[in-house]
Amino acid sequence: MVQLSGSMMPIRESIERELLALRQKGRYRELPSVTQRSGNRIRIGGKLLLNLSSNDYLGLGDRREMLDRYLVTLREAGYAMTSSSSRLLTGNHPLYGELEQTLADLYGREAALVFNSGYHANTGILPALSTRHDLILCDRLNHASIIDGLMIAAAPYIRYRHGDYQHLEELLSDAAGRYRQLFIISESVFSMDGDLADLERLVALKKRYGAFLIIDEAHGVGVFGQKGLGLCEVAGMVEGIDMIVGTFGKAFASVGAYAVMDTLFREYLINTMRPLIFTTALPPAILGWSLAVVRQQAVMSDERNRLQALAARLRNALRERGLAVAGESQIVPVVAGGDRQAVLLAEKLAAAGILALPVRPPTVPENSARLRLSLRADLQWEDIESVPELLQGL
Ligand code: PMP
């Protein structure tokens, strides 16, 4: 009989082994049983907890009066719960046009294009735009959806050290003249570290080397900027960035994503971007809600200011107790190091009525497991003031 090597083991057996190893390492994942959500509280596994693991940064998903208003619109307009087809066939409801025009106008850019999710956007844009004659330079800590896009793209890529623009410049200068096009891609607010990209520097580099700059503002939109357009608005860099990607799934309290860009690139993506072409369009019911949220959030700078002040206060309080806290945004990560330690800390908070889920590798680099405290504008200081003490002695 043929002896099978480890990697040739029958699939069930090898999967069972892998799952066991994940359990032993404290890396096993389960889908939590979320039975109820209301404002910043969440009932999970039967227990009501303060929710510090939500991306609904403005609390818009739980604004009852806004939802009720939208439900009336939905009924009156008769928006369907399915589009039944891709955008290029019969799924391109007029709300797509209205939403895209609204976004383009808000940003003051030529055009916008809406996608089914940020994941669709990031796995589709670079594979569509780049060829094997190009080079993509990607921040090392960019989100998994961006990395998956790099795997699909025909162009080679290099990941530059996180936020190290010196390193990026070395790579750009080394690559200059050797490729049809250089691309740079970075998040603005990094999802797991809560720190900020230097957009001014990235735009300067992009200009110097004629690169095409894509910024993923998934965690920036709704949270930064007078109109909630993200860090690009704060930095005054909306014009200088070739493509700004935002999602509706976080502060915009819906589902889907968009990018703002020049008309030429919109036209090209419609013709070439596979996750746009080969998927069922978003339901009109969702598009209508996204439109309502985009308009509403544009006038919520008080909430944005409150959120940032709250995050700054929490970061300071954590640092005063000697905790390793990264970030400069509403995402406040407390790095525990070991996977088990992060899990234990999460359990400690849960016992005190606070939900902050541990984030472990491969989502974050090895030995940097952490609690990702994610704040919302509808929290009061009193809700979270016990957190630093609970985490002390890490
Ligand atoms: N980009 C970043 C930086 C993200 O954090 C996420 C979501 N975690 C995405 C893209 C994907 O967006 P979506 O959830 O809309 O698919």
Image (cartoon, rainbow, N blue to C red):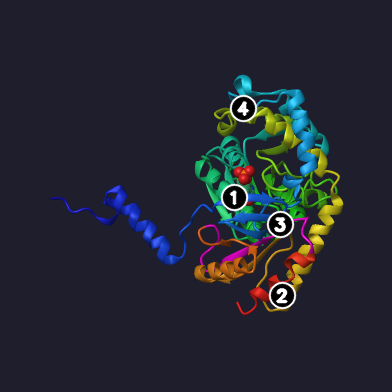
Tag 2 near tag 3, CB within 8 Å: no
Q: Can I make out residue 176 in this image? A: no
Crowd around label 1: few <14 · some 14–19 · many ≥20 (10 Å):
few
Lateral position of residue 343 relative to residue 237, left or right:
left
Choose mark 2 or mark 1, whichever is in front: 1
Of the residues shown, which amino acid type is indicated by label 2? Answer: Arg
Looking at the rendered structure, the number of numbered marks drawn on it comes to 4
Distance CA(mark 3)–CA(mark 4): 37 Å
Give the quarter of the image for residue 61: top right
**Which disc is residue 35 wearing?**
1
Closer to the camera in the image, 111 or 29? 29
Q: Which residues are magenta?
A: 363-380
Quarter of the image with the C terminus in it: bottom right
Disc 3: which residue = 197
Of the residues shown, which amino acid type is indicated by label 4? Answer: Thr
Q: Helix, strand or loop at disc 4?
A: loop
Give the quarter of the image for residue 71: top right
Tag 2 near tag 4, CB within 8 Å: no
- As for residue 213 lying within the magenta part, the answer is no
Most extreme residue toward the left is 1
**Which disc is residue 319 wearing?**
2
